Amino acid sequence: MIKIENLEKIYRTEEVQTKALNNVSLTVNEGEFVAIMGPSGCGKSTLLNILGLLDEPDGGNFSFAGTEVAKAAERRRAELRKKHIGFVFQSFNLIEELTVFENVELPLIYLGVGAAERKEKVAKVLEKMQIMHRRNHFPQQLSGGQQQRVAVARAVVNSPSLILADEPTGNLDSSNGNEVMELLTELNEAGTTIIMVTHSEHDARYAHRVIRLLDGQVVLEHAHV
Amino acid sequence: MFKNYFLVAYRNLIRHKGFSFLNIAGLALGLTACLLIGLFVHDELQFDKFVPQGDQIYRIYSERTKTETPETLAPVPPMYATTMKQEFPEVEQTTRILMESSVDLLEVGDKKIYVENGLIADSTFFEIFPLDFKYGSAAHALDAPMSMVLAEDVAKSFFGDENPVGKQIKMNKTSFVVKGVLQNNLSKFHLKVNSVIPLSAAQLPKERMKKWGWHQFFTYVKLRPGTDAQQTQAKLRSYVAEKVNPTLPEDDKVTDLSFLQPLHEVHLYSANFKYDSSVKGNITYVKALGFIAAFILLIAGFNFVNLSTAKSMQRAKEVGIRKTIGASREQLMLQFLSETVLLTLVSVVLATVLTALLLPSLNTFTGKTMTFDLLTNPGLLGVLVLLTVVVGLVAGFYPALVLSSFQPVKVLKSAVVTDSVFGRVQWLRHGLIVVQFALSVFLIVCALVVFRQVSYLHNKDLGFNRDQIMFFPMRGDNMNKHYDTFKNELQQVPGVASASIGYGFPGDQVAGDGIIVPTNGEDKEKGVTQLMVDYDYLKTLGLQLVTGRDFSQEMKTDKDQAFIINETAVKELGFGTPDKALGQTLKWKVWNNKNPDSLKIGKVIGVVKDFHYKSLYDKLEPAVLQIFPGAYWKVAVKLKADNIGSSVEGVKQVWAKFSPESPIEYKFLDNNFDQMYKAEDKLKSLLWIFTGIAIFVGCLGLFGLATYAAERRKKEIGIRKVLGASVGSIVSLLSKEFLVLVLIAAVIAFPAAWLAMSRWLQDFAYRIDMPLWAFLAAGLTAAAVAFLTVGYQAVRAATMNPVNNLRAQ
């Protein structure tokens, strides 16, 4: 599903050049659950942003679902994003002016899905995330765990083939965190590919495979059994 | 999709109430000012547009080239129309209106009313101006000599609601027959019409009508379709030069330049015309107001842009999320544009309501009858819709561009979006503030200069004492015949200091005429103002003699052989000094229809100090005063300072004795003078109001920006405070940035304001020097207003607990 080769990303400020990613090569197959780990500043979020087509690499190849996207235009990347990728963030990133229902509905609107179908799909996913009873609440009226469930619901509502999770449990207590991890596992078992950045060894154990980064380079790759 | 946009827009609006208020209030206020000005300007531009084929109609006017500064005269001699009708095939029709400013006494049965604005016109008047008739018809309405057409209001006051066509009406004791009644819809006509009678009724001597030098007729020509007016104008000039002048004696040759003025320009482009009785506007003021409207809209629009980009920090996260989810840049731009259009719509609706509420006041102020009815005027609705869309799109475009350009990777990571993201909008925001303040400073300077000049106009020492002088025209045969007893009795009234009868009182009409100065055995005629006075003129007006003596009843020769001149005349007539002027001989062609060549020959017996009998727009002219009972038409009564009320009563009683049939219509001379500057007074008020609005709207924006600046620098302020910064130093830190902008604005605005105001002042023959303090005051006002606006936020930010600020990061 994802194949990157010799990926490079360089951040420049006036005086300093930082190599955030240095010759990273990586393959993620369909249906896999991969965790990316490493200390702060090792480049894992940069990698995730590139994988999520939010950011462009400075060098190397990146093939997404069989097409080369390393130099794709923003329009094309937005297109791929909305069709194939769902995002889950540490800070939930829900739109505060929209209700739970409307937040989850948003990706479908951008996909041009009709109103009746949207309603049905959103209801279904909210049921699944057990947050249906809160559908008319605004994000700030929900607990952190509930907000993250909404965020996951939004990520999966258009059935993406890939979910990118950036420290999805980082702002949650352990029981809420476990709940979210269970959700992701379920999705993965249903066939969705998941790539997750995490600090937590505990969370990483949910993944099939762990990739460890240090100073922008892959230093270790190992599979969980 | 749009439902989602509007939902978010609506909730944003509600959530950030203060911000929404600033944005909407500023724009609504700006739009209201614009709409009101727009209505006024539109109304001014509508004058005479209702006249069918108005683009073929021209007024002939002439420019005097003989005088030192060219004078533009609205009336022209009678022969222009006659000649053009006869000799110029491209002229379809002409009509003339006799210039006369008398008030006519209209009588039906016992009812008597004095009515102004009675026109004496060629019978072709209604062919050029086919006005709507309520009763009767335009065709042949003025054919018979004793015909009269009445305005609806006048007809109503005599005949009520019945059709008066065919009925008798007396004008100044002569009988006329009512031939028609005009509809009451002439508010956009440049002529004030209460009655129209044909020229034949005036029984002007035939010889007079053949004059080429008697500037007495407002003359209109209608050209055939497709005629080039410029060519006709050139043709007229060369006709006069080649065909007319050779037939005239040397003294009577036409030296004036004639012009064809399009009908549609008569109202607005005749501000400096002399002897013009049309309803005048002033294109300079109309344009100035148009500029101010544009300024205010610009300021309000800039607010919008500024506040929106400032607020975009809070929207950055939303943009990031939407983009991550898959929104394209176009979709986001569309979203933000629809938000601004929505905000604009709310503002426009508010502005519409405000305009409707304020319009009656504007109508009272301008004396207009403007309407703001959306139901009957679909064009207006179109303007509003257009305004919403254009303002919404223009003001929303830049914020939308900025917002939609945010990169999700950057905005989602940091909890607070830092300045770096906004670096490039900083200069724009600052630029907009500079422009806003430059416009405000410009308006403040203008308002102050206009204010100074207007109070100068009202308060300048005019060289005579204008206080407590009652002023009224003579009425009725009895009064005219016994003017001396009338005057005597007036002077008997306790409380009356003195009284004078004549023609040529300050603030009223004066006659211009020639005076002949014999120099080196040759008679030379010079144009001067003729003030027809009596023995008490100087005393009544408090004029000061420079040398010589006043007219005296003791001196038998004073009536027919004496002149008094003013200081300017001493110079212009070439006498050198006042003392040398004494005893010099002057000759004057007496106003006498029977014997136009009779001469009054006399000596200069006195010189008066110059005094302003005209408005301060006009330069002092040479003036000649003489005793001439033939023009005893107006009365000035000087009252003593106390008990004015009973003095006025006393004057009224004397009046009633001499002219019981008509009520006295008096004014006070100083009011007369103040009337001259009505346009300037109004300009002054309008400038104050709109300058106020511009500053207020600008401040709303500045306040909003200061709020966000303080917000943005919370962390910095926190750190500074932890390190020991005082509240004062932080306030100055935050305010300095804005004050620098105001300073730059002032530097830009000053030269522009200087130029604009110098040009305005140029129109006045007597004017103030450009007041430098006005510039200083404008700059300080702008700075003070900016400081107060920003300071409030700065103090708030500076007194906050730094721990809270730092933790928030």
Image (tube, rainbow, N blue to C red):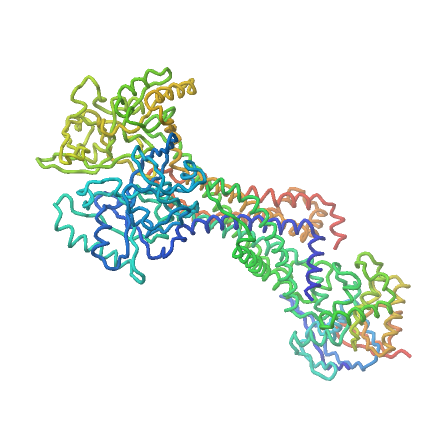
Q: Does B386 sit above or below residue B101? A: below
- Quarter of the image where one finds residue A208: bottom right
Query: Residue A80: percent from the left, percent from the top?
Result: 71, 77
Please identify the quarter of the rendering in which residue B395 is found: bottom right
- Where on the picture, by quarter, is residue A71? bottom right
Direction from residue B457 to residue B325 in the image, left or right: right
Q: Determine the residue located farthest toward the front in the rendered image.
A: B166
Q: Which of B219/A146 is in front?
A: B219
Residue B662 location, x and y as percent? 36, 27
Rendered position, A60 above or below B449: below
Residue B112 point in image, percent of width and height: 37, 31
Quadrant where the N terminus of chain B is found in the figure = bottom right
- Rendered-image quadrant of the C terminus of chain B: bottom right
State the count of labels. Answer: 0
Nearest the viewer among B435 and B175 is: B175
B134 or B703, which lies in front? B134
Front one among B526 and B710: B526
Write the residue at 78% across / 60% down. A99
The answer to whether residue B737 shows anywhere in this view is no
Residue B535, percent across and down? Answer: 25, 22
In this orientation, does residue B741 appear?
Answer: yes
Q: Is residue A34 left or right of residue A23?
A: right
In the image: residue A107, left or right of residue B70: right
- Residue found at the far left of this picture: B521
Compared with residue B73, is residue A220 higher up or lower down, i.e. above or below?
below
